[in-house]
Image (cartoon, rainbow, N blue to C red):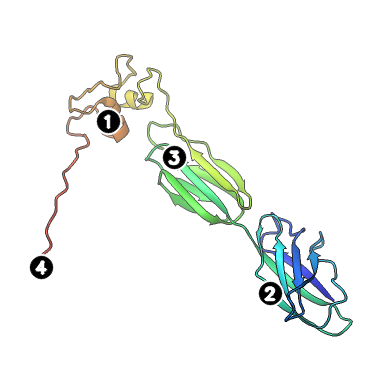
Amino acid sequence: SLQLLKSGNDTAYLPIVGAVFSVIGPAPAVTPVGTLTVGVNGASEVLRGLAPGVYTVTETTPPVGYLPANPFQVAVQASAVTTEVTVGDTVRPGTIIISKNIGQGSYTLNGPVSQSGSAIFTTISNAPLGQYSIQFDDVAFYQTPSAQTSTLAASNVLVFAGNYTFADTNHNGISDAWEQYYFGSVSTNRTQFTDTDHDGMSDFAEFIAGTNPNDPTSKLVSCRPSFTPMAH
């Protein structure tokens, strides 16, 4: 007779009940002789009446959220003692996506996997399950996104979105805090096309670029790439 004992590497979040195994043999036979289903106690029923020999056991239905175990062989002896085999499954990892709506600023992710970064879009694949929290850093003239906490479940995608915002009472797409800092007031006459320092970059463009709208030498300049031939 044969009985399977089931284990998983993340039973804190996922139960292992419901795994189904097909038993084929004894070798060289390739005919199924029965199935074993894992119950709530982590053990299957006992498959009795097996002839002595080597059997191939295949997990046809893994527990929800787990990858199936690799097929394996087990030798059943000619005795009244039940052969017990422990089978371990690995949880299906999930995916974490972190996004920001501006290029500035960084984040710190804490959880079973922790990391920091500043990219606008980050994907963490094969992330272990569990609870994650994220903190976005302050960016001048923007309102910082609130800290977020959520739990990654098996095979799922967990999304953290950092949406930086700002007050814009004159509706010109420029942060009121930025206008107050550089001009001392929020003017209804300042539009996205106003160029206070007459350097060819509008105040709106200087806000986006992070340059000084009162200094004509503070602006983005595109440089033509140069090429240096390699010596032979």
Give how far across and how far down residue 179 sits, in percent.
Answer: 32, 24
Give the residue drawn at x 74%, y 59%: 16
Mark 1 lies on a secondary structure that is helix
- Left or right position of 79 against 158: right
> Quick one: 8 or 151, which is closer to the camera?
8
Above or below, 119 relative to 24: above
Instruction: Please name the amino acid that badge 2 sits on.
Output: Phe
Between disc 4 and disc 3, the foreground one is 4
- Left or right position of 30 against 101: right
State the separation of the CA atoms marked 2 and 4. Answer: 60 Å
Q: Label 1, on which residue?
A: 206
Above or below, 148 relative to 90: above
Mark 3 lies on a secondary structure that is strand
Q: Label 3, on which residue?
A: 100
Residue that protrudes farthest toward the left in the picture: 232
Answer whether residue 114 is visible to the viewer in this image: no
Chain-order first, disc 2 or disc 3: 2
